Image: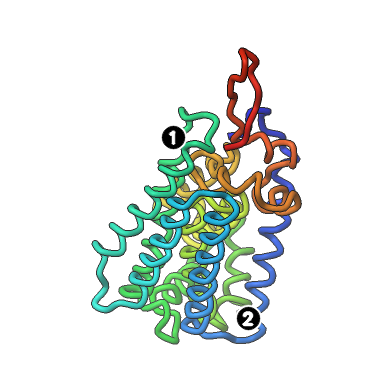
């Protein structure tokens, strides 16, 4: 983790990136009238190809072959979760945690505060939970059925119930005017968001961006179910966890951000990882002793 502390300004660049990603994805999905199935295929392809690219960079540039292998294994688990029928829950889940475990093991040398492991646990568990939700929507919730499935039912109910507090009318207008006319697209966008943000959080890659997008996701679930509704208690727990992950820069604790921060271009570290150039090159410097004098070296 960053030794120099956290500045609020550190989170502005990742917030800008998160908003830009959100606008682009929603624009492509809605303007292009993409079906939920088409969105899922596109997102899975991007995640799998992106994982291979990150793994190659880890191996060749970051000299973290075990973390690279873990990244590939985690990607394979995602492919199994969505492409293999009947749905092998135990298989993909086991591979998911094995892959993440390899990443944690190999990036421990990049984590300057070993005691920050609870942040890694929080990040991994809630990241997996997002992915698990997404695959459940695919196999059991029928969110990709062409009609929106369970998502459309929840959205319809949220749009039609009597307002319970002052934000309800505004959000119900959003549901009626934008979401419900294209329930298949929005079901796909929502589930693909869970899949993407969850995977990024679990492996600790561009964690601030993923955390901001996860906060957006949880906020929508809370507003859809009703802020004062008991039914939104799990979504409030997700919101709280994602907020902790964000403000503590949890990707720098046994995550890919810790291993890659000093190897990626400075602009990427700043805008996607929330790390300044000075911090990036100090994330994993370790002291060595030469002739009785302590010097800093990068492993």
Q: Is residue 157 above or below residue 249?
A: below
Q: Position of residue 95 (x, y in %)?
A: 32, 59
Q: Which residue is mark 2?
A: 30
Which residue is rendered at x = 63% and y = 73% of the image?
Answer: 26
Within-10-Å neighbours for mark 2: few <14, some 14–19, many 20+: some
Q: Please identify the quadrant where the C terminus is shown.
A: top right
Please indicate, yes or no, whether residue 164 appears anywhere in the rendered image.
no
In the displayed orientation, state which residue is furthest to the top: 292
Which residue is rendered at x = 59% and y = 57% of the image?
Answer: 213
Q: Position of residue 180 (x, y in %)?
A: 54, 79
- Nearest the viewer among 224 and 297 is 297
Q: Is residue 170 above or below residue 152?
A: above
Which image quadrant for residue 29?
Answer: bottom right
Q: Which residue is mark 1?
A: 117
Left or right: residue 270 compared with residue 36:
right
Which image quadrant for residue 83?
Answer: bottom left
């Amino acid at each position: 983790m960053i030794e120099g502390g956290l500045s609020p300004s550190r989170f502005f660049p990742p917030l800008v990136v998160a908003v830009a990603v959100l606008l682009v994805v929603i624009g492509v999905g809605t303007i292009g009238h993409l079906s939920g199935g088409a969105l899922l295929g596109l997102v899975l392809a991007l995640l799998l190809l992106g994982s291979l690219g990150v793994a190659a960079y880890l191996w060749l540039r970051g000299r973290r072959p075990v973390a690279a292998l873990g990244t590939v294994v985690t990607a394979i688990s995602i492919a199994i979760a969505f492409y293999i029928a009947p749905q092998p829950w135990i298989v993909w889940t086991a591979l998911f945690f094995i892959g993440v475990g390899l990443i944690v093991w190999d990036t421990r040398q990049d984590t300057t505060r070993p005691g920050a492991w609870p942040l890694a646990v929080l990040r991994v568990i809630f990241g997996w939970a997002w992915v698990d939700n997404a695959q459940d929507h695919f196999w059991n919730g029928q969110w990709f059925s062409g009609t929106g499935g369970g998502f459309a039912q929840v959205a319809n109910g949220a749009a039609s119930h009597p307002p319970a507090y002052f934000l309800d009318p505004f959000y119900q207008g959003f549901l009626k005017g934008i979401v419900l006319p294209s329930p298949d697209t929005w079901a796909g966008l929502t589930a693909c968001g869970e899949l993407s943000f969850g995977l990024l959080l679990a492996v600790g890659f561009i964690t601030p961006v993923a955390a901001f997008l996860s906060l957006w996701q949880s906020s929508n679930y809370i507003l859809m179910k009703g802020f004062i509704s008991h039914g939104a208690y799990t979504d409030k727990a997700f919101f709280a966890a994602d907020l902790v992950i964000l403000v503590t820069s949890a990707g720098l604790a046994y995550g890919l951000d810790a291993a890659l921060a000093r190897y990626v271009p400075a602009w990427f570290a700043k805008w996607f990882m929330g790390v300044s150039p000075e911090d990036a090159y100090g994330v994993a410097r370790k002291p060595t002793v030469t002739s009785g004098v302590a010097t800093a070296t990068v492993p």
